[in-house]
Amino acid sequence: QVQLVESGGGLVQAGASLRLSCAASGGTFSSWRMAWFRQAPGKEREFVARISRRFDITYYQDSVKGRFTISRDNAKNTVYLQMTSLKPEDTAVYYCAAADSSGPYNYWGQGTQVTVSS
């Protein structure tokens, strides 16, 4: 049974940094595409960043480019989201997602709250 567990969220001031972690279990992590999504209050869940299963190819939503960095450690079965220069509009529940095929992300974590005060 695949499980994704996020951690690292919290309440910070604008301009601060946070690093989110997502620990995976129950499958072959190194073969999964991984991503982070977020959902702000009253809004739909949106894509934030993704990283490929091989060669660590990354892709970001325009609003986080240059501020967020996604990475993975296959030895630790963990994907990270380093967030810097945080803005109030980054406030959301952040979700880790995994895809074990070329299809949609089919495994999701429970989410971790990030709140950025102005």
Image: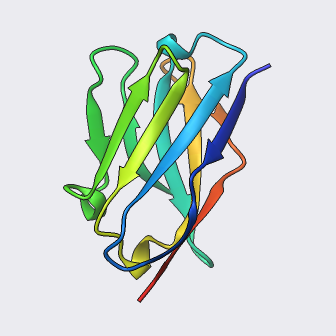
Quarter holding the N terminus?
A: top right
Q: Whole-percent x and y of residue 118? A: 41, 89
Please state if 32 lies on the left or on the right of 86 as rendered. right
Q: Is residue 116 above or below residue 50?
A: below
Task: Please give the name of the residue rendered at 67% of the width and 13% of the height, measured from the top-left corner.
Answer: 27
The residue positioned farthest toward the bottom in the image shown: 118
The residue positioned farthest toward the right in the image shown: 1
Task: Pick whichever, 21 or 39, lies toward us.
Answer: 21
Q: Is residue 28 above or below residue 63?
A: above
Question: Is there any visible trace of residue 87 in the rendered image?
Answer: yes
Task: Please give the name of the residue rendered at 28% of the width and 64% of the height, measured from the top-left corner.
Answer: 63
Task: Pick whichever, 9 or 26, lies toward us.
Answer: 9
Please state if 101 lies on the left or on the right of 111 as rendered. left
**Colour scheme:** rainbow
Q: Whole-percent x and y of residue 106? A: 64, 31
Q: Is residue 77 above or below residue 16?
A: above
Task: Please give the name of the residue rendered at 28% of the width and 68% of the height, measured from the top-left corner.
Answer: 85
Task: Please give the name of the residue rendered at 62% of the width and 48% of the height, measured from the top-left corner.
Answer: 7
- Give the number of callouts: 0
Q: Is residue 91 above or below residue 70?
A: below
Quarter holding residue 6: top right
Question: Is there any visible trace of residue 45 in the rendered image?
Answer: no
Quarter holding residue 94: bottom right
Q: Whole-percent x and y of residue 5? A: 68, 39
Q: Whole-percent x and y of residue 97? A: 57, 37
